[in-house]
Every structure is written in C-alpha cells, then in structure tokens.
Amino acid sequence: MKRLRAVVRGRVQGVGFRATAAAEARKLDLRGWVRNRTDGSVEVDAQGADAALDAFVGFLHRGPNGARVISVDVEWLPPELTAGTFETR
C-alpha cells in the first residue's frame, strides 16, 4: 500500500476534473480526497494498492475531456490508517 499527494496544473478547473478524478479513484478502490486550489491547480491525496495508484497517476496526467494537463507533481508519502472512501472537497 502506498499514498501520494499530487498537484495537477494546467486547465484543470471548470472542466469536471475533481468529479472525474473522484470517480476514477473510487473505481480503483482508493481512499482520499481531491480539491481545487486558489492558484488554479487541483490537489489530490490518495492511498491504496500500488498498481491502483500507478493507474491513477496515469489518469492525472490525462484528466477528463476538456482538461489540458501541463504538469503533475507527485510526492510519495507513508500510508496513513484511514477509513472511508474518496471525496471531493
């Protein structure tokens, strides 16, 4: 199990990025959250199986239709003991 925190930059607000990322994360059985930042980027904190997180990072680089991802900065962190699902903040 791994955990990541990522900041996605580009045209990522106003295009359904958070909702699509949350749906993708739930499909991959990840835990965590996604939120817009005041600088126009999107921040993600996700935890789950290694292969699922790798697939999720691939999604973050593409985004939904209408998004134009310029960069994804990923920081790998120690897993936390958390329960719940993946939420949009």
Image: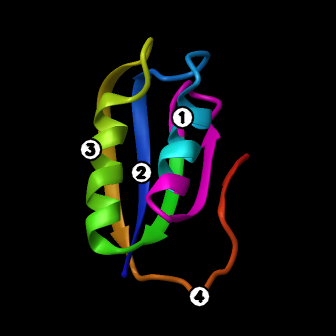
Between disc 1 and disc 4, whose residue precedes? 1
Which residue sits furthest right? 89
Question: Image height check: is 40 above or below 50?
Answer: above
Give the SS element for disc 2. strand
**Callout 1–callout 2 Cβ contact below 8 Å:** no
Question: Magenta segment range?
Answer: 26-42
Residue 58: numbered disc: 3
- Name the residue rendered at 41%, 82% in the picture: 78
* Colour setting: rainbow
- Name the residue rendered at 59%, 35% in the picture: 18
Residue corresponding to mark 1: 20
Residue corresponding to mark 2: 6
Residue corresponding to mark 4: 81
Q: Nearer the viewer, mark 4 or mark 2?
A: 4
Disc 1 residue type (three-letter): Thr
Distance between the Cα atoms at labels 1 and 4? Answer: 25 Å
Question: Image height check: is 81 above or below 74?
Answer: below
Distance between the Cα atoms at labels 4 and 2? Answer: 19 Å
